[in-house]
Image (cartoon, rainbow, N blue to C red):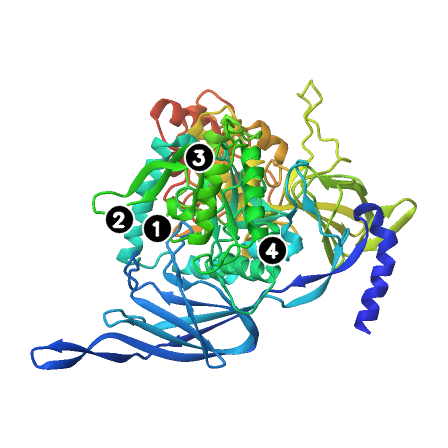
Amino acid sequence: MKKLALLTLIAFLIPVLSPIGDGFHLVKKYTYTSENRTQNLHFTDIQEPTASMKGLKPVTLWKQATGTADFSSRQDMFTIRIPKTFVIDPGNDPIQVDLIVDGKAFPVSVDLDEGGGYEAYYYTEPIFLKKTDQVSYTIKTRSDVRIPTVSIIGLDTDANSLHMAFGSDIAEASTIKNTSPDIIKRADWGADESLRYADSPTWKPILAKLEADKDKPKSDATLAYEAKNRAIAAHLATDFPEQDKAIEKITTENGHPLVWPIEKTKQVERIVIHHTAENNLGNKDDLALIRGIYYYHTVVRGWGDIGYNYLVGQRGQIYEGRAGGDYNVAAHALWNNKSSVGVSVMGNFMTDSVVAEQENAVKGIIEYLSEKYGIDIHKTSIGHKECRTDGCIINDFSTPNLAGHREIGFTSCPGDNLFAIVEDIRKTETASIGRTPTINPDYNSIKIASLSPNIGSMNILDKWPTIRIRLSYTGSSIRLKSGDTTLARLTIGNISGTLKKNPELPFEAFGTDKIALVLGKKKYPFSKVELAANIIAIPSWNRKPTWDTTGTMNDNVFRGKISLLNEWGNLVVVNELPLEDYLRGIAEVSNTDNEEKIKTILTAARSYAYFYSKPENRKFPGKAYDGSDNPDEFQKYLGYGYEKRSPNSSRLVDATSGQIITYNGQSIKPWYFSESSGQTLSYKQYCTERVKNGTLAASTVCQDIPYLQSVTDPGGVGHAQKWHGVGISGIGATYLATNLDFTYDRIIGYYLDGVKVEKKY
């Protein structure tokens, strides 16, 4: 009956939505069902005979532990997580691991690739087997190694459910140029993009634990690792600024904060070839292998996405890897990711042979990338490799523009057999000779100036709280669309899907509680309507600034997600987006103001919004939004249009990211205003005056707020008070910064007694 109801619903919706997204269809949605079994280890000594003066004598050099992990469902990819209580160096491997299924042992190697942030665990290379709900293991270590526990992680790479989607069910290949190879998209190999979102059910508990643990004492190893990374990052930012900096950082996608933000570079200098090194003993197809690697990198390792830009399959198919498109930073070659593109070939080519289809695909993708990015593979560029000697942290040296991973990292990757092909291509290829680097068409010096160098590649804690803002849109009907070239994700009722085109979607309030999709003369009411994209435009809203004589500006474009609500017959438009992106669209301060004054007001505005985003501090109780774009009741918010024309303000949002004003450790609602007459008001003075003039009820009890006291405001001398006069004075902030060299945190502390500025996220 459920299946019949689903098909009936599809039949109803096909004529409704086919003009928008080529209709609905059923697809497999891979659920990435995973289980984790943590077990204590109990080691027994392995005694080996050794010669002595008294003959053979048993000694203990190694020890071993065994165990069995039972899973509630059948899994086909496995990896073992091992606490990093020991060091593995080239030629010094103190551990051997076997997985055992049906009495057969499969040796697995420890994966030594690093994502860029400190990881407290080693992981074995993924092994793909026939589905089973039980695996055993044997772990042998040197006698001096201490491993208290291990975790056996299993994944069902084929687990799926039927899902309704928009658009054609035909897989599309990227065809940027006629000469480009067919590149199978992420959606077509079954990527679950929610695994990249910090607000997803997968990541919420992970990030909550990280947040809870962030103030715990760090181990000496962690502190040393972080210090080393800071030193390397500073070196690269100083000595190789063009190579090391990103020109764009995208922190959200379809209204969701990204675990690993997308970063774009000015140019790509090098192609790095890898092998995936997994053990495919279960004869899994390409798609299952990619889904397994994707989950392993994204969730198990905690990177936030797959680490390769492209993958080559077992029979030469080419697959899209890391999300984000061209010039995007991946995580495949530590300290070299921002200047390279990574291609990984499926297989372990220390033992496997490279089949002809794979070799042809490798040559094809190399030529495609060389042409796209202007890479002469016969030339060299500067690569970076950590030192293994005291007194040195990183070596900078010339490396081929077509490199095997082993040439810029401590690894055997891409395996001897594949590396031989890489070397042969460097000797015989001629098409790339004379090519010069192609600059990213989005390159913009303002973007470069607004970004700070990141330490490593992973930004796992770069997550922001979100805020919901009611927009001042009026009218009972509205049109929405994606505001750039990306395709939007539409949710109507309980159905969601990505549109295959970018039309204007017409909606209107229907009755007292529904939103109707309007197609011609027909109206189709739904209880829920949301449109999510990188940028969303509201073409039906004329919000042009009165001062713009060119008529080209219109503040009707927003980041994140637009939700449509019906409140008793009234259309309500809500913009939900990460708090930091909201700050970029705040017009509470001029882009040309003193920088410390801008940072002062931005920090106050962030703190104000953060305070009201908490359930216990509702500005609009019972409503589905936290604030509004009306400065008379919340803050002046203009959205993406203001962000584009205020690069200085946007840069200073980044400079103060996550900083909140607190009092006694608690976030507060900071008061701020434009001008005083030389003395600010305390909250009690302000409240008392409003009681006297009848603005507040006579029964109001005006209480004293410790951090909202009256202070001298030298910048306001000779001016008339504007707005309420309580808290931070805008004109005073300018005066203190310009004349007394106050920094923004000192300005805030001057006007708000006893507060602190703390980084809360």
Image coordinates of residue 4 in percent, x first then y, are 84, 70
Task: Tell me whether circle 4 and circle 2 mark residues in contact (CB < 8 Å).
Answer: no
Q: CA distance from mark 4 to mark 2?
A: 38 Å
Q: Label 1 crowding class (10 Å Cα cut-off): few <14, some 14-19, many 20+?
A: some
- Front of the two marks 1 and 3: 1
Q: Residue at x 51, y 50 (%)?
A: 344
For the question of whether residue 586 can be seen, the reply is no
> Mark 1: which amino acid?
Phe
Q: Label 4 crowding class (10 Å Cα cut-off): few <14, some 14-19, many 20+?
A: some
Q: CA distance from mark 4 to mark 3?
A: 36 Å
> Mark 4 or 1 closer to N-term?
4
For the question of whether residue 587 can be seen, the reply is yes
- On the image, which quarter does residue 537 sit in? top right
> Mark 2: which amino acid?
Arg
> Mark 4: which amino acid?
Arg
Q: Which mark is residue 410?
A: 1
- Front of the two marks 2 and 3: 2
Mark 2 lies on residue = 388
**Left or right of residue 28: residue 580:** left
Task: Tell me whether circle 4 and circle 1 mark residues in contact (CB < 8 Å).
Answer: no
> Mark 2 or 1 closer to N-term?
2
Q: Residue at x 92, y 46 (%)?
A: 521
